[in-house]
Amino acid sequence: MTQRVEIVRRIMDSNERVALENRALLDKKGTYGINIMASPGAGKTSVIMETLRRLTPHIRAGVIEGDTAPVTIDSDKIAALGFPVVQINTGGDCHLDAVMVDLALKKLDLDQLNLVIIENVGNLICPAAFELGTHANVLIASIPEGDDKPYKYPNIYRGLDVLIINKIDLLPYLDFRMDYFSQGVEMLNPGLKTFPLSCKTGEGFDAWIDWLTTTLPAKA
Amino acid sequence: MTQRVEIVRRIMDSNERVALENRALLDKKGTYGINIMASPGAGKTSVIMETLRRLTPHIRAGVIEGDTAPVTIDSDKIAALGFPVVQINTGGDCHLDAVMVDLALKKLDLDQLNLVIIENVGNLICPAAFELGTHANVLIASIPEGDDKPYKYPNIYRGLDVLIINKIDLLPYLDFRMDYFSQGVEMLNPGLKTFPLSCKTGEGFDAWIDWLTTTLPAKA
């Protein structure tokens, strides 16, 4: 048992090291990296697609798609929008890690990109433990998941830079206590930047796009 | 690396062994065990609570609640209904395993119980790899998660005995292609017993309760 812990710790250390290298690469290229995490079905791909559609043309974005199974459902959607996309198949693993992202970054022409959006595997537990080297960790929560998720999955909320609350168009049909949800978030991550929005109606999207646009570094 | 794989395999073998012991214990006591898995927010606790409310009084049920964080939100709800409940805190792990369930089963008075419902950790990936020793693996899919989940999380669908499709009351508000979803399920698990239902409206619940009731073994 001691042995196993030691090995796992060594893997974590190694992930940390590669994450720092990924960050250094992104910084050198002037490319902003975002790690998008969420529960399955919270709308990661939908939010990414709507974000890509709304970015002004002078922002050039690429996408890295993480999936546990060898399916290209999400990658195909992104490619159909005309953006470069690299798919990572984790082979059953429940999260991306920095080494996978390192390999994927090298397949993108970062000199041409202001922004790389990484769609992590749909999971609220494992991705929280693996930094990828991005500039912002973003969680997409969604209204149908319920208002108790910050209390049940605290680790992922603690490490966030941005929280998107998706599917707010469903609020009239569900018992979601926004104050209870927000109280949980505030406890774990005080002052967390939060964007409630809907991919379906477009409500709230402007604020997220404004934030993202002003956050991107100037490209050399 | 070889070393790590070997250790992980030993852990899996050990899980398998304890799962068989759990099953033997349940069989000896005449208690039917169900392992309920789902994505976070699909409605595991709601389905369990509605199931407990609808069981005829001569069926005595107990619940084992798996959570990744040390919160008792779900356990408190079950206890409030008057059913015995044991909580397992996985300490950050993304799934229950047979050893955790073994410890929990020993805290329940199985001589008194016809049914033990185990609520696994909210996750579509990790729980698929760990048999608990229950008689039925049940997945709760939910309409807002989207219709592509069987294609993206095939492993969990392959190992199922029963599929519950929850939140069908939300079908009018979402673009969920039931035929596409069902086609994916059928490919992975032909003829899988499936119960579409809604905890909110109660629609479809009778069929699930009927199946469960007729499946329970006679108690000595």
Image: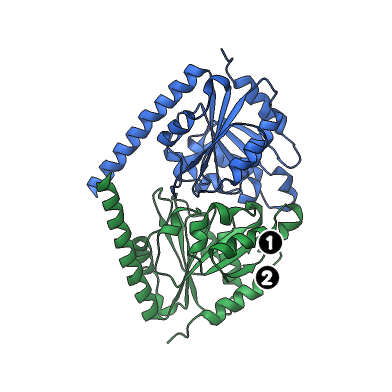
Chain colours: A green, B blue
Q: Secondary structure at mark 1?
A: helix
As drawn, the label of residue A155 is none
Location of mark 1 (residue): A179
**Which of these two is toward me, A119 or B137?**
B137
Front: mark 2 or 1: 1
Residue at 60%, 46% in the rendered image = B73
- Subunit bearing disc 1: A
Disc on the earlier residue, 2 or 1 = 1
- The picture quadrant where one finds residue A47 is bottom right
The residue furthest top is B220
Assign the C terminus of chain B to one quadrant of the image.
top right
Mark 1 neighbour density, 10 Å: few (under 14) some (14–19) many (20 or more) = few
Which kind of residue does numbered mark 2 sit on? Gly
Q: Is residue A71 above or below residue B188?
A: below
Q: Nearer the viewer, residue A105 or A194?
A: A194
Label 1 is placed on what type of residue? Asp
Give the x, y percent position of residue B25. 45, 22
Viewer-nearest residue: B146 or B76 = B76
Q: What's the residue at 57%, 63% (across, down)?
A: A187
| Gap between marks 2 and 1 measured at Cα | 18 Å
